[in-house]
Image (tube, helix red, strand yellow):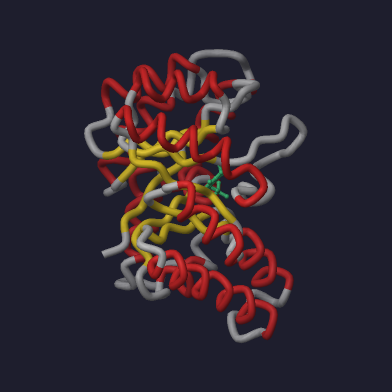
Amino acid sequence: MIDLGVNIDHVATLRQARLTYEPDPVWAAAAAHLGGADAITVHLREDRRHIVDRDVELLRASVQSKLNLEMAATDEMVGIACRLMPEMSTLVPEGRHEVTTEGGLDVAGQEARLKDVVRRMQDAGIYVSLFIDADMKQIEAAARVGAQACEIHTGPYARAFHENGRDIESAAAQAELKKVGAGGTAIIDCGMRFNAGHALNYINVQPIAGLPGLRELHIGHAIVSRAVFVGLTEAVREMKRLIRQDADIK
Ligand code: PXP
């Protein structure tokens, strides 16, 4: 069974557009839970552009499934994580000028620093995942720094799929799908848990969900977008049916 982590950052984006109190990501977590979310994911960014500290504090107190805190590997964020104790932290690269996370973490380029961060969080009892590109060099480095899981960045797959007529048989989409699959196999061979996410939606998710050994998908923008029309609980329910391959909702 593949688990679904629902990223609710963009519920907070809507709130921050008016600098007001609604919609509340805490309500979103409850609605996602009712739809079958296995985890709630939030990214507390350095610039607090969507999720803010108050959200993570209240979510920590109220989420009864798994809370996955996406964060940069900074001392500030390690301190927050070790105080709030999410079940899982996913370390991501962070740039102030990016619209969304643009690439995987360069683990190989900062092994010593990441080894220290991973150890500090694991010592506190947090399960650590690294968001990386489907690249052997990064996967091997992730294993060396002691990560328990890797989330493969599916953005390049999603782009190839959409730029090639949304045709999963296209050579470009197939090539990117193969890279994610090979990355997943390598992650599992290195003794880590294989997760994936980014830019997945109701149209492109099923080939990824069919990859052997995949344990979790982390999806945000597409689910929150669909929620505008069908409600968040229903949007989550439809995505869960898709990733468990027992429906064909597009
Ligand atoms: N996984 C990671 C590590 C991310 O940074 C994001 C975006 O915040 C997602 C998954 C979800 O991406 P999307 O919103 O495109 O579904």
Considering only vertical position in the picture, is 212 above or below 225? below
For the point 44% across and 14% down, which residue is it? 54
Q: Is residue 46 left or right of residue 23?
A: right
Given residues 144 and 248, the one toward you in this image is 144
Farthest left residue in view: 64
Considering only vertical position in the picture, is 145 above or below 81? below
Within the image, what quadrant is residue 28 found in?
top left
Given residues 65 and 191, the one toward you in this image is 191
Farthest right residue in view: 97
For the point 41% across and 25% down, which residue is it? 81
Q: How far across and down, in percent of the image, does residue 143 sit?
A: 46, 55
Q: How far across and down, in percent of the image, does residue 192 sit?
A: 38, 58
Q: Is residue 182 left or right of residue 209?
A: right
Given residues 209 and 105, the one toward you in this image is 105
Q: How far across and down, in percent of the image, does residue 74 sit?
A: 57, 26
In the rendered image, the quadrant that contains the N terminus is bottom left
For the point 32% across and 26% down, which residue is it? 85
Q: Give the total of numbered labels.
A: 0
Q: How far across and down, in percent of the image, does residue 214 sit?
A: 38, 66
Q: Is residue 210 left or right of residue 22?
A: left
